[in-house]
Amino acid sequence: MAEHNRYSAAAFDWTSNLVQQYKLTAPSPKDFQGDLYPCIKRMCSERWWMRKVLGLQRRTIESIARDIGLVCSQRSAYSSRFTKAARKRQKERNAAYLENTYIENDAGDQFSLKELHDKSVANPAVRRAELMTRIKGFELVAQHLGHCGEFYTITTPSRMHARLKRGGKNPRYDGTTPDQAHQYLTNLFQCIRAKLHRNGLHVYGIRVVEPNHDGTPHWHLLLFMEPSKCDEVRGIFHDYALRSNPDEKGAAKHRFTAKAIDPNRGSAAGYVAKYIAKNIDGEYLDVDKNGQDAKESARAIDAWASTFNIRQFQFIGGPSVTVWRELRRLARSEQEAPSPVVVQQATLAADASEWAAFVMVMGGPIMRRVLRPIQSLYERKQPFDPETGEVDTDAITVYGDPKAPRIIGLLADSTRIVTRTRLWKLVTGGAHSPPVDSGHRARMRPVLDLCQ
């Protein structure tokens, strides 16, 4: 077949139909500026197929286990024993890889990936600390602005729950999988946010996703807002939460619940802390609400979230955490170049872990991100040299599309502040070891993690 025919619209249609026959989602040309080439390259790649098929396999096995009653508080809460064991093996292999792989910069400094992992938000303890810092910061901002806190819970209709509370089969269950139920809640929240925006209602806070005992997701939201707007915001959440199957038994009582945060009875951050700990590592908790060991429950929830690719925590409103992390990096660097006053103020706040001060320096909790005084600075390499037409292989993926822009620093008042000045390469076995073929390593890890 001629080269131009290999990547034609007919070739894309044929490969897409083949992918859909295996219940997979074909890549969309819209994601690549209408270019069919990277889409077809993906669908012709063993690596792409392996990753997609193994992901589908994991979700299918866990969904079947849930459907036949192996996922419930009486058998194995949140995720099946098989999935928990598979996730444990995967993390053990990943840990071994991190311990035995090193990264070295152009100054000769060398670290194991395990060292860097433990200092980053990939470490559950660091992740939990950063989440709590941001939540407490939002609470301080709310107190400063005279805003109130509300704690909401949104659940799915009964038809999406596989098991009843006591473990019996739910007669209304329609086969909805956890990721489909999560997508339902995501779409519901998109409608709610659009309605809030139309009505000029501004909220900020955090969303936490966690599973019921049978793996069906539900959402908790800690939101801050003007006291005069609380009733209207509650009404909108209640209205949208009951738009599907509003007359079923228990819908009015359980589909949406709201509690006002009373500062006299405890802080908002303290109220949500148990949900953060339960869904990360179970630290500082003895048992969960089902009476099971909190750390074991956290491992089961981690396996559930990994299997169904569910983002457990998401902040609503507020400035970019990427800017916050780059400012903390800047504070620890040896750079002495002058920077705008706003950067100096934000750097002091970030370095002191004062999220509230950082939010106010960045314009408050509800300002649009594009209007914030400090932006992330990204570097996008050109795939082709404009003068010679030569392809830069470092600027394109193995599928032929441009790589995503790489963050290199911050931008404020037209001033570029580069925070990432070193070049790094992977090496194995520590000092005097040869560089790693990082592309080959990246291709192999998903297969090793899931198949061994």
Image (spheres, helix red, strand yellow):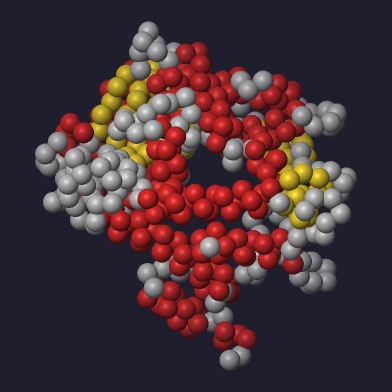
Q: Residue at x 66, y 25 (%)?
A: 350
- From the top left corner, tell me how far across and down residue 295 is, in percent: 44, 34
Q: Nearer the viewer, residue 48 or 255?
A: 48
Tell whether 272 sits left or right of 333. left
Q: Quadrant location of the N terminus?
A: bottom right
Give coordinates of residue 163: x percent, y percent.
21, 47
Q: Is residue 306 left or right of residue 440?
A: left
Please indicate whether residue 267 sits to the left or right of residue 291 in the image.
right
Count the marks: how many? 0
* The quarter of the displayed image where residue 363 is located: top right
State the image coordinates of residue 340 (x, y, percent, origin top left).
Answer: 76, 27
Decide: is 180 above or below 416: below
Above or below: residue 72 compared with residue 49: above
Q: Residue furthest bottom?
A: 1
Is residue 134 among the parts visible in the rendering? no
Q: Position of residue 82 (x, y in %)?
A: 39, 54
In the depicted structure, whether residue 100 falls above or below residue 142: below
Which residue corresponds to the image point at 61% horizontal and 48% vertical from the top-left? 95
Hey, which quadrant is residue 299 in on the image? Answer: top left
The vertical placement of 382 against 127, above or below, is below
Q: Please tell me which residue is depicted at 48% across the width and 51% down the height of the picture.
A: 87
Q: Is residue 119 visible?
A: yes
User: Quick one: 72 or 374, which is closer to the camera?
Assistant: 72
Q: Residue at x 83, y 68 (%)?
A: 387
Query: In front: 185, or 303?
Result: 303
Q: In this rendering, would 401 be left or right of 30?
A: right
